[in-house]
């Protein structure tokens, strides 16, 4: 799939022939106009706040179109050794894990949105495979705990990569083998 973070990126993806079913729109700064465009295009919107859930409910009703959503969860743990931490406490990206059950009830009960899954992302720019594997396990376990509150079965789970690139002398490339094996074990 393709992740986009703006109306311009969404347009480029669609113009390039990407199927709307394979596009997800994330980012805490989505405007009303961008949300309208996303619903009209039929792409998956990663909701980042209760306000965004409410707004998407209104937009979907106005457009008489389903709004496909995944909840972007701000996990209660962080990806150790990350250049940019996206979890482990309040952050602008996503809904804090302890608030997600209430948001999930609102998605199904109050707003009639089409829930598809979760987007969990604990950090980025990490060169330690063991840290990424640990974050994947914790993300998967968190998704299982949250799924019991979901208004529909989880069909989509984005664990985020967090994969780093060596920029400085002495940094070594990330070994992807243990990460792939860890994902396979989680999927089995």
Image (spheres, rainbow, N blue to C red):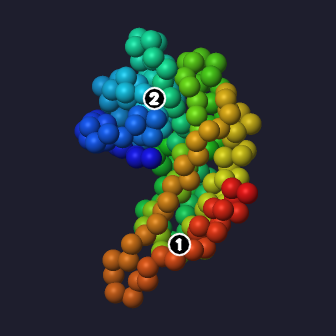
Mark positioned earlier in the residue sequence (1 or 2): 2
- Residue 135 lies, in percent from the top left, at 61, 62
Residue 52: image tag: 2
Camera sees residue 48? no
Residue 151: image tag: none
Q: Relative to 97, is 41 above or below?
A: above
- Residue 31 lies, in percent from the top left, at 32, 30
Sort mark 1 into few (<14), some (14-19) or many (20+) by Cα contacts within 10 Å.
some
Q: Relative to 138, is 38 above or below?
A: above
Disc 1 or disc 2, which is closer to the eye?
A: 1
Is label 1 in a helix, a strand or a loop?
A: loop
- Residue 137 lies, in percent from the top left, at 67, 60
Left/right of residue 15 with respect to residue 188 in the rendered view:
left
- Residue 106 lies, in percent from the top left, at 61, 24
Left/right of residue 38 with respect to residue 176 in the rendered view:
left
Residue 176: image tag: 1
Residue sitting at 42 percent across and 40 percent down?
23
């Amino acid at each position: 799939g393709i992740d986009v973070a703006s109306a311009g990126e969404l347009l480029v993806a669609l113009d390039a022939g990407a199927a709307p079913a394979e596009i997800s729109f994330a980012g805490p700064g989505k405007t009303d106009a961008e949300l309208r465009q996303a619903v009209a295009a039929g792409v998956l919107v990663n909701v980042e706040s209760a306000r965004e859930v409410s707004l998407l409910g209104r937009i979907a009703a106005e457009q008489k179109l389903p709004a496909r959503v995944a909840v972007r969860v701000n996990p209660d743990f962080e990806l150790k050794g990350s250049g940019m931490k996206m979890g482990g406490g309040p952050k602008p990206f996503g809904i804090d894990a302890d608030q997600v059950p209430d948001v999930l009830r609102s998605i199904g009960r109050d707003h009639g949105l089409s829930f598809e899954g979760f987007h969990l992302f604990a950090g980025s720019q990490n060169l330690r495979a063991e840290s990424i594997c640990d974050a994947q396990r914790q993300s998967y376990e968190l998704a299982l705990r949250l799924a019991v509150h979901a208004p529909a079965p989880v069909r989509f789970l984005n664990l985020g990569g967090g994969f780093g690139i060596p920029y400085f002398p002495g940094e070594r490339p990330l070994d992807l083998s243990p990460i792939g094996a860890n994902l396979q074990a989680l999927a089995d």
